Amino acid sequence: MKLEKILERLNSLEKGQFLKIINNLSSAEKNNPQLDAILSRADSNLKNADAVQVTQAFNALANRYLEFIMEDYSKVASQLDILLNIITRDGNCIMRLDWFAKLYDDEIKKQKKAIEAFKADVNAEKPTMEESRVRDYKIFAACLKTAYFNDVASNFSPKITPDEQSILDELAKALELSLDERTMIKYAVLGIKKASNIDDVVSELKEKGLIFLSKKNNVIYVADEVVSLARKIRGREVADKYFRRVLLQLKEPQVNMICRKHGIDYKLTLNEKIEQIIASGVSFSDVLRDDIHKADSKMIDKKKAISALCDERLQITPAIKGATLDEKIDNLIAYFAKQYADEKIGISTGGYERLLLDLDQFVKGASKTIRSAYQLQEEEVMHGEFLADFNIMPRDVLELFAPETLVDLCNARQIKTRGNVVDNILAAYKDTEDLLVENYENIGFRNINALKENGISIQEADLGTTFEDVTKYILAQLGLDVDEKLRKKLNTEKDKMDIIIRTGDNSVVLVECKTVKESGYNKFSSISRQVRSYSSLLEKNDFHVDKIIIVAPDFSEDFVADCGDEFTLPITLLKAGSLTAIYHAVKETGSNRFTLQMLSRDILVQEDRIIRALKK
């Protein structure tokens, strides 16, 4: 979940520690024009800033914040390595406190079990891993032990100094140790203890600004922006879902080479091996640079292999560039970082919902697979908006399943199975907007039966939201500036505007959407109070309301008359059918002549006149 969205959900006390950290870091920051501009708008105090400004300040201070976290991370006594393992995992950005406690308990148990197996294997007469790898482990363990305990001889408490830590970091890099391997060696040498009180663990993370805790709901939030930085600390260059995407495109012998290199059982199934590689913290760049290539491979051959992976298998456009192998890998990492920061889900919200409904119906155990892969606590996870909050997008969901598993869905929905099955499925659900536009009036009239007959499954409770979403989509397709960011920023618990269209720097058109069963919409007194309140809210925030458009499937004659007699509000009425007709006319003619002024001539929009003007 994005930092801005989290900040908007929390009260001042719940985000106080985070703001304190950012304020302190900003005070120490010099020569940062971007930060100075943000602070000047917030009266030099981020406690007075809104969620957008705080997010901008955090992004401007990203490197400072990274250094701040590293101060504790380098301390051997800290369990931040284990805790960051939990909070950077895909699907763990929203957790109830009891679920976090369970994940922490599971992680400690998993580490203890792995450490015992690791120690037994390293010290065995015939280890299962390669002899050279055992030697690497023993070298790192001996150096770690010396660095930690050498203070005891001088009558000081054991610790690792920053200089010693930097040497250990370089050694681990030279030995090509994964994060998992480093963590196991550390706790094999020093031991591992579970914290007696989960509140202490939560406090440690809060003190560093790594998490937010909503005490009202007992929910922990981890911002996507924080996850990206925490991932850098752990050496995880890309999100797990992107690592999985790349590993799925490799040949199985290449996956086996990675497993042998890092002590992972190569006799597991392909999917199990991939999940083990991801969980073990193997370096993404090391995998692409060395692990998947034969020992005698030339640099030019490695570069060609990575180019083929990006262009042909991952089908990334525009092509990932880079004069050298390292540049190409760095640019691929940057591409995935940009993808992670992007809020777009790739298909429509409605398309995502339909995809999840169909997966649940035609792919056995789909819900369980998603819950397990992303460690989700909730039983009901098959909802697009819910998964999008966890930054889990349609492609991420589909890539959890082997292609042969998705064939049942393809057969049921007559989706071609030739070529890339995931791409074929996504393409099939991309047309959902058009399907919803075709059924726009049915949605507005809350006609569930007609929608079902046309292959659209929407819950009764979601019809109002869907009507809003389709209205936004149509208005945006007509070339209007639908400003979702401004709407979310200005909306309050009391006033929740449906749609805002920007017409200038400080001028807007307010759009209100209403569904109604069968007869025309007729609640004039109710909606007039509503839009007056919204207009006041906009004016308080220095926005002038040029026009108020009410969209519904139909209006009663009395309602139209009442709106005609209302002179204090600039109201225009727009039927869903009229808006659809205008949309199709613009689409068919390719005209870019549509303007908001075309909707301003009458109280009730006459689409025939507008369509004639568009076709001239």
Image (cartoon, helix red, strand yellow):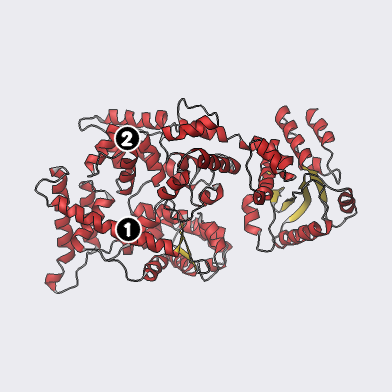
Tag 1 and tag 2, C-beta contact below 8 Å = no
| Residue identified by numbered label 1 | 107
Residue 302 position, x and y percent, is 29, 31
Q: Residue at x 83, y 56 (%)?
A: 524
Q: CA distance from mark 1 to mark 2?
A: 35 Å
What kind of residue is marked 1? Glu
- Of the two numbered discs 1 and 2 in the rendering, the one whose residue sits closer to the viewer: 1
* In this rendering, position of residue 383 left or right of residue 521: left
In the visual, does 235 lie left or right of 419? left
Rendering coords of residue 533 (x, y %): 75, 61
Whether residue 370 is situated above or below residue 253 in the rendered picture: below
**Which one is nearer the viewer's eye here, 457 or 96?**
457
Residue 112 in which image quadrant: bottom left
What is the number of the mark on residue 25? none
Sequence-wise, the earlier of marks 1 and 2 is 1
Residue 468, image x, y percentages: 68, 47
Q: Could you tell me which residue is drawn at 88 percent across and 55 percent down?
A: 567
Instruction: Return the residue at label 2.
Output: 325
* Dot 2: element: helix
Which residue: 72% across, 61% down? 537
